[in-house]
Image: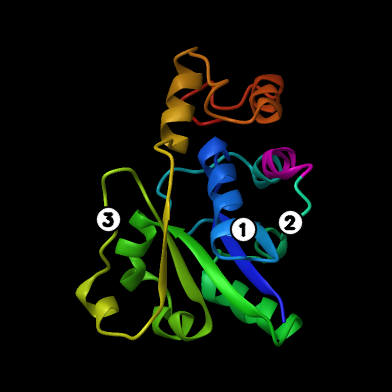
Amino acid sequence: MKRIGLFGGSFDPVHSAHVALGRLALSEMQLDEVRWVPAGQPWQKTAQPVPAQHREAMVRLAIAGEPHFVLERCELQRRGPSFTLDTVRELQQREPGHEWFLIVGQDQYAGLHTWRDWRELLTRVTLAVANRPGLIARPHAEVERVPHTVVALPMMDISSTEIRERVEAGLGIDNLVPAAVAGYIDQHHLYRGSSGS
């Protein structure tokens, strides 16, 4: 039986805190692998992310060379909005008998009660919640009433929003994203205009 962490998100763009969190989850939770799951159509995002092929390419670059990091493309291949429960159901059906962990940020944990069929999701995975420095994640009262397991993980204080804003303002991001990702963003002129691409 493998211990598999699922790390989903828009990754718009993936950054150094994501990579550090993935490595921390591997070691702290003794995972066999972390599956990186870029969202095809992030259903809770109001702004349109850059096209999926760019976000996928940046994740590939960020996780290259780490044998326990795996790109999972199921949400990119699925039509319609990317719901986490659909992904968990699909993977558990495809690969039965493993133990599954879901790595989320504290903002996602706080909003978990808005997720589709979140009660079923909590029966299928153990949550690993990444807390930003100085903050402890608290779920909604509805979520607190449902038995579930949470593993707390610290997270560096970097945000994708900050990176997009810095690129648009012409500022450097070399210390915020892996070098290959910075090169990709520059090469493809991502985040330069108000449209986000």
Q: What is the magenta range?
A: 57-65
> Sequence order check: which comes first, mark 2 or mark 1?
1
- Please tell me the numbered disc located at residue 26: 1
- Please tell me the numbered disc located at residue 68: 2
Query: Dot 2: few (<14), some (14–19), or many (≥20) neighbours within 10 Å?
Result: some
Residue found 48% across the figure and 28% down from its top? 164
Say which quarter of the image contains residue 178: top right
Provide residue 44's location: percent of width, then percent of height.
42, 57
Query: Dot 3: few (<14), some (14–19), or many (≥20) neighbours within 10 Å?
Result: few
Can residue 83 be seen?
Answer: no
User: What amino acid does circle 1 point to?
Assistant: Leu
Provide residue 88's location: percent of width, then percent of height.
60, 76
Can residue 152 be seen?
Answer: yes
Query: Residue at the top extreme?
Result: 170
Pointers 2 and 1 in contact (C-beta within 8 Å): yes
User: What amino acid does circle 3 point to?
Assistant: Ile
Asked whether 75 or 8 is in front, the reply is 8
Q: Is residue 74 above or below residue 161?
A: below
Asked whether 173 or 150 is in front, the reply is 150
Provide residue 154's location: percent of width, then percent of height.
41, 50
Please, what secondary structure does the residue beneath circle 2 have?
loop
Please, what secondary structure does the residue beneath circle 3 have?
loop
Say which quarter of the image contains residue 34: bottom right
